[in-house]
Amino acid sequence: MRFDIVTLFPDCFTSVLSSGLLAKALAKQIAQVNLVNPRDFTTDKHHKADDEPYGGGVGMLMKPEPIFTAVESLPTLPRREIILMSPQGETINQPLLKELATNYDQLVVICGHYEGVDERVLHLVTREVSLGDFILTGGEIPSMALLNGVVRLLPGTVGKVESLKSESFEEGLLDYPQYTRPANFRGWKVPDVLLSGNHAEIARWRYEQQIQRTGDRRPDLLEKWQQEKQGGRGRGQGAGSRGEKNFPMSNDQ
């Protein structure tokens, strides 16, 4: 997948792109990231990419011309989405990341800055995306989150595909508690069931913990999960529908 990041501050991405899974994905050519600075597409001698808003107001707005020219300079792959990182967009969640990872070959991501971008840039954009209901100094950090979330879903990035299937939000619930050695750390013991070797009981415990943790920490998610589960039953879907588990009755699997 190709990513074209339109940003006034390309240096912000240096560390992110040179470490961890992202660096490995780039080295394996699973993903390609191209950083584009709209200042390089300005026509005045000062390379001015922002200006004062018409009608007055605080701060500066990014001008439309450099953004349009920067995006129009890029190659166009058949399945392309042009995304503006904006607090007015749809919030990033796992279904959105899956959609982008599955349905597109190219993501052009525009990072706003200052007080945002000229409204006419929206004529270029096909989707607005937000990191959440808060304001940052620019779209660089949200775009890094989007980039990370999409790339890790691309085939070959994560070594064990199974690990992607058992994460928080994959089935509408938060993840269950996890432990490693030592079994007793400063008096905090690993739950006995995890040491039992009984895989059916471990699966049951983990499922119950997912429900409990989601209810405690994200009751909104639990309510949504319960509604979807009930809706599945209403359509005649039996056990094994989304969000339901079938537990083996013995350890012989």
Image (tube, helix red, strand yellow):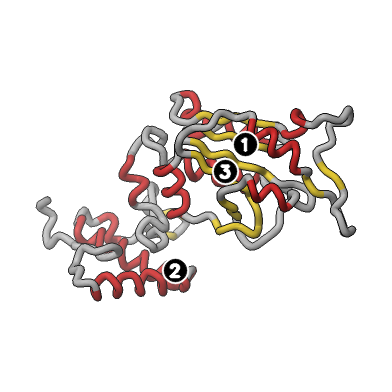
Q: Nearer the viewer, mark 2 or mark 1?
A: 1
Q: Position of residue 49 (x, y in %)?
A: 80, 38
Which residue type does callout 1 highlight? Ile
Residue 66 is drawn in which quadrant? top right
Compared with residue 52, is residue 172 higher up or lower down, i.e. above or below? below
Q: CA distance from mark 1 to mark 3?
A: 10 Å
Q: Are marks 1 and 3 in contact (CB under 8 Å)?
A: no
Q: Which mark is residue 82?
A: 3
For the residue pair 59 and 223, the one nearer the viewer reads as 59
- Amino acid type, callout 3: Ile
Label ID, residue 221: 2
Give the quadrant of residue 57: bottom right
Q: CB atoms at circles 2 and 3 under 8 Å apart?
A: no
Closest to the observer: 167 or 249? Answer: 167
Whole-Å distance between the Cαs marked 2 and 1? 32 Å
- Foreground pick, 209 / 23: 23
Mark 1, secondary structure of its residue: strand
Q: Nearer the viewer, mark 2 or mark 3?
A: 3
| Dot 2 or dot 3, earlier in sequence | 3
The residue at the point 47 percent across, 28 percent down is 24
